[in-house]
C-alpha cells in the first residue's frame, strides 16, 4: 500500500469508524492517552494529506482507540460479489420444490390432493413446452 490514493482511503475508513462511534476528533484523541497525537496530525491522517504514509504504530493506536482491528483500517475495498451474467438463467426449481412451496402457502395447507393436481398440470405444461421447443429446434435444422 504505497499510493497516496490508498492512504487516503485508509484515512476515510478511520473517519468513517470514528463517525460510526459518534466521536469527534478531540474525543478520539482523548482515548489515545497517554500517547496522544496532535489534532493536526489526526486531521492529516484522516484526509490523506501527507505525502508520506503514517507509521504503523500510529494506525494501530487509532485502531485501538476506536476499538476496531488494525487490518480493517488497512484493508482494501472488498471485491464485489460475482453476480451471474444477465444471460445466465437461474436454476429451475424441481417439481418437488414447487409442491413443497405450495403446501407451505397458508390457503393450500392440508389440500394435498389439490396441490398434487396442480403439480400434474405443471408437469404436463413443462412436457408440452419441451416438445414445442424440440419441434422448433428440429424445424430450424431443416
Image (tube, helix red, strand yellow):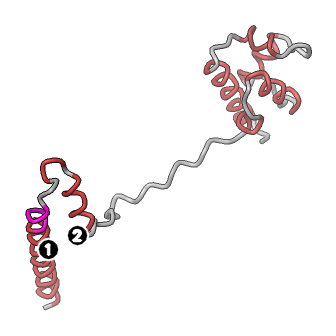
**SS at mark 2 in the image:** helix
Return the mark for residue 95.
Answer: 2
Residue 53 image position (x, y, % from top left): 83, 31
Q: How many marks?
A: 2
Residue ID at (23%, 53%): 104
Toward the top, the furthest residue is: 26
Toward the right, the furthest residue is: 35
Whether 90 is drawn above or below 141: the answer is above
Return the mark for residue 123.
Answer: 1
Whether 52 is drawn above or below 116: the answer is above
- Confirm whether the magenta stretch covers residue 113: yes
Return the mark for residue 93.
Answer: none
Query: On the image, which quarter does residue 98 sit in?
Result: bottom left
Alpha carbons under labels 1 and 2: distance apart: 8 Å
Observer-nearest of 10 and 124 = 124
Q: Which residues are magenta?
A: 112-116
Whether 136 is drawn above or below 79: the answer is below
Quadrant where the N terminus sits is top right
Whether 57 is drawn above or below 18: the answer is below
Residue ID at (73%, 23%): 66
Q: Main secondary structure of the magenta part?
A: helix
Residue 31 image position (x, y, % from top left): 80, 14
Query: On the image, which quarter does residue 90 sit in?
Result: bottom left
Residue 55 left/right relative to 43: right
Query: On the image, which quarter does residue 5 sit in?
Result: top right
**Labels 1 & 2 near each other (Cβ < 8 A):** yes
- Confirm whether the magenta stretch covers residue 2: no
Amino acid at each position: 500500500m504505497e499510493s497516496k490514493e490508498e492512504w487516503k482511503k485508509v484515512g476515510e475508513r478511520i473517519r468513517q469508524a470514528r463517525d460510526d462511534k459518534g466521536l469527534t476528533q478531540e474525543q478520539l484523541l482523548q482515548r489515545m492517552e497517554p500517547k496522544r497525537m496532535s489534532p493536526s496530525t489526526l486531521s492529516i491522517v484522516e484526509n490523506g494529506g501527507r505525502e508520506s504514509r503514517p507509521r504503523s504504530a500510529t494506525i494501530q493506536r487509532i485502531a485501538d482507540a476506536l476499538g476496531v482491528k488494525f487490518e480493517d483500517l488497512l484493508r482494501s475495498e472488498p471485491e464485489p460479489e460475482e453476480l451471474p451474467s444477465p444471460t445466465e438463467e437461474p436454476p429451475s426449481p424441481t417439481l418437488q420444490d414447487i409442491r413443497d412451496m405450495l403446501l407451505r402457502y397458508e390457503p393450500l395447507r392440508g389440500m394435498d390432493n389439490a396441490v398434487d393436481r396442480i403439480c400434474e398440470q405443471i408437469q404436463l405444461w413443462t412436457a408440452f413446452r419441451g416438445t414445442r421447443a424440440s419441434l422448433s429446434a428440429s424445424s430450424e435444422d431443416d
